C-alpha cells in the first residue's frame, strides 16, 4: 500500500508505494494536503540507457492538470475507500478488474487499479491520463 493515511489531518511530504508484481514504484509529493506531484517509475525499463535502473513513466505536477489550484487538494483527488485492504488483496491474488476505472495502454491495469484501491478517485485518474496523453501527443491511449 501507499504509505499514507487519507484520514490524516495533513498530508505533507513524500509518500511511496510499490507494485512488486510489475516492478513499479510510485512517489507522491504532498505539501499541506496539496498534491504537488505524482511520479510512477517502471524499474524494468532501460530503453537503451546502460545501467539505468529506473525509467519514469509518469511525472506530472497536479497544477499542470488543473487551472484551479483547489482541485489539487487531497479532498478533491482522494476518496475514502473503505475496501482498500480487500481491494489490494484482490489485486494481488486475482485477475478481477474494476470496469469503471479508466485504462491506459501505457500502464498495466494493475498500476491503475493500485492507485484507485489506495484512494485516488476516478475523475482524477481520468484527468491524469487525459493530460498525459496531451503532452505526449497521444502516446498514452485511454480506453
Image (tube, rainbow, N blue to C red):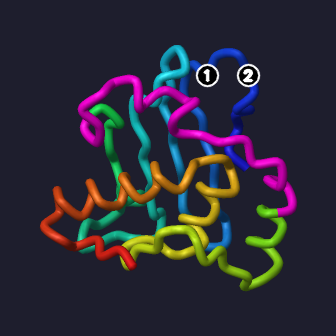
Q: Which residues are magenta?
A: 64-86
- The tally of labels here is 2
Q: Would residue 98 appear left or right of 90 to someone viewing this image?
A: left
Please tell me which residue is depicted at 40% across the width and 73% down the height of the picture. Answer: 104
Instruction: State the mark number for residue 8.
Output: 2
Please tell me which residue is depicted at 36% across the width and 53% down the height of the picture. Answer: 127
What x and y, as percent, mark residue 95?
72, 85
Q: Nearer the viewer, residue 15 or 46?
A: 15
Please tell me which residue is depicted at 40% across the width and 24% down the height of the picture. Answer: 70
Q: Please tell me whether mark 2 sits on a helix, a strand or a loop.
A: loop
Please tell me which residue is depicted at 35% across the width and 74% down the height of the picture. Answer: 142
Residue that badge 1 annotates:
11
Q: Please tell me whether mark 1 sits on a helix, a strand or a loop.
A: loop
- Are circles 1 and 2 on residues that touch, CB within 8 Å? yes
Note whether 91 is above or below 87 in the view shown: below
What x and y, as percent, mark residue 74?
55, 30
Q: Nearer the viewer, residue 120 or 49?
A: 120
Note whether 120 is above or below 62 in the view shown: below
Image quadrant where residue 99 sits? bottom right
Note whether 28 is above or below 90 in the view shown: above
Q: What is the distance, in whole Å, between disc 1 and disc 2 at their CAs?
A: 6 Å
Amino acid at each position: 500500500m501507499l504509505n499514507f493515511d487519507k484520514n490524516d489531518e495533513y498530508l505533507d511530504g513524500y509518500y511511496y508505494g510499490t507494485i512488486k508484481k510489475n516492478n513499479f514504484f510510485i512517489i507522491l509529493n504532498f505539501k499541506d494536503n496539496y498534491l504537488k506531484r505524482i511520479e510512477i517509475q517502471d524499474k524494468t525499463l532501460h530503453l537503451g540507457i546502460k545501467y539505468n535502473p529506473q525509467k519514469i513513466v509518469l511525472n506530472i505536477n497536479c497544477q499542470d492538470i488543473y487551472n484551479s489550484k483547489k482541485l489539487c487538494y487531497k479532498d478533491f483527488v482522494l476518496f475514502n475507500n473503505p475496501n482498500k485492504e480487500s481491494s489490494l488483496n484482490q489485486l494481488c491474488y486475482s485477475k478481477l478488474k474494476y470496469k469503471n476505472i479508466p485504462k491506459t495502454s501505457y500502464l498495466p491495469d494493475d498500476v491503475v487499479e493500485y492507485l484507485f484501491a489506495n484512494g485516488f478517485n476516478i475523475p482524477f485518474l481520468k484527468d491524469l491520463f487525459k493530460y498525459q496523453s496531451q503532452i505526449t501527443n497521444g502516446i498514452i491511449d485511454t480506453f
